[in-house]
Image: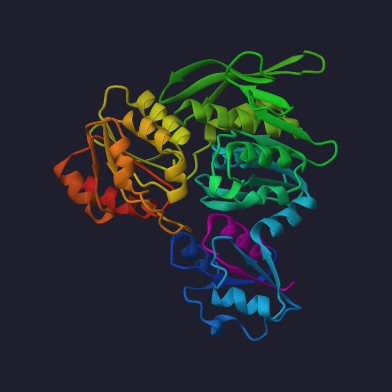
Amino acid sequence: MEHIYFIGIGGIGMSALALYFHSKGKEVRGYDRTPSDITHSLEEKGIAITFTEDLDFIPKHYTPENTLVVYTPAIPKEHRQLVYFQEHQYKVCKRSEVLGLITQESFCLAVAGTHGKTTTSSLLAHLLVENNAPVSAFLGGICENFQSNFICKGTEITVVEADEFDRSFLRLSPTIACITAVDADHLDIYGDAQEFLKGFEDFTRRIKEGGKLIVRKGIPFEGLTYGLESGCDYQITKVRIENGGYLFDIEYTNPENGEKQIAPNCRLYKPGEHHLLNALAAVAVAHQAGFDLIDLGKALSTFKGVKRRFSYIINTEKQVFIDDYAHHPTELNALYNGVRTMHPNEEITILFQPHLFTRTRDFAEGFAKSLSQFDRVVLLNIYPARELPIEGITSEWLLSQIENPNKILIEKSRITDYLRENPAPVLVLAGAGDIGVEVETIKNFLEK
């Protein structure tokens, strides 16, 4: 196909695919609901984008014979452009289908899991680039080392984030797969935790013949294990904090012959035990792909992180401001532990925007417990994303369950007013909705 049209081109996964086809010399254009940093960066590369459903934006030379249409499940079925392409017999595919076709043709390294997959896949891509691998990477976040969610250093190896939402990861064909966590989520899709776990089990069956599976120790699938505890095939040992980061060893014990390899004195400048686990998972996948363990360990020190994954926006003696994508109770626990590790004696305020009515309903007890750990809780209204409201499921309802007297619900427009009246020496912004748009405004306010 000469032309690729994306409906939902501003999405983090969609934009990576758009950049991939653009790098292949295809004519790429598309629609998104609102302008964003991602759509601006695509437009700067010459990709035309519309923010209306106007059919006139579709070029006359786009025909069913020469055009592939890619859409995201977040797009409503009645979207005018989507309906037009379907009615006129264009080849219309979900993003996951297209990514699946790409992985079939390459040595694919896929990272799945309820938490940690974006950071782990970004770490993996970084390690491979540092070791001169011919890799293309499709990431679920903006990797700070590349300032992009798409990396193209070759096509022999692909790194992909295997997304469990809508069972998208069942389209992939990994050579080596990694599963970081299987905490229940997306119960609006799967129904219950057992069916959610079955989705991951089905994903393991997508591994190519002769391929390998790597799992966090304790996940109930047969494969190489990684973790901080003893008895793992890949283990982190001798952890200490030094110069604002972690210093540690990585040990690999070959399960076939018992031989041990050690990568000593590895460094990682991302706080929190979860980041150590993400780093270990990335090293394990790259090592099983044939790269040297010691070289991989050395490359960890230059990883800058992923935008909105424990990102320090301000880090001074007077003010700390951290932005994070956490939107599940387990992620909020990991976020709290990371912040408390780095700022043990400070008052920590969390500004949290719940994401999805169903997720808020299904994990309300977990959210209440994880949020209660913070010294102050500032709650915003639920970000609906693709959902309609559910009666009784509101931020007021969630707030009532938080066992912390220092809690408040405010409108998003009142954030700076609240901070003016209630200074927050350590402020943590968290959520997967549109709360990230407020980062620059809050940063400017705090700096003044």
Magenta segment: does it hold 17? yes
- Front one among 258 and 168: 168
The spot of residue 431 in percent (x, y) is: 40, 45
The picture places residue 401, in percent across and down from the top left corner, at 32, 36
Q: Residue at the far front: name it.
A: 391
410 is higher (above) or lower (below) than 280:
below
Q: Is residue 310 above or below residue 284?
A: below
- Residue 168 at x, y percent in the picture: 65, 51
Residue at the image point whose x is 53% and y is 44% from the top = 145
**Residue at the (65%, 42%) spot, across then down:** 129
Q: Examine the image and state in which quarter residue 284 appears.
A: top right
Relative horizontal placement of residue 320, taking residue 384 as reference (left or right): left
In the rendered image, the residue lying farthest to the left is 421
Picture mark count: 0
**Which residue is found at the position 67% from the left and 75% from the top?**
86
Left or right of 218 on screen, residue 302: left
Location of residue 297 in the rendering, given as x and y in whole percent from the top left corner: 62, 27
Query: Left or right: where does residue 205 sit relative to residue 189?
Result: right
Give 367 or 342, whichever is nearer the viewer.
367
Q: Is residue 327 magenta?
A: no
* Residue bounds of the magenta highlight: 1-23
Quarter holding the N terminus is bottom right
- In the image, residue 96 sits, relative to residue 423, either above or below, namely below
Q: Please say whether residue 291 is visible from this viewpoint.
A: no
The answer to whether residue 396 of the structure is visible from this angle is yes
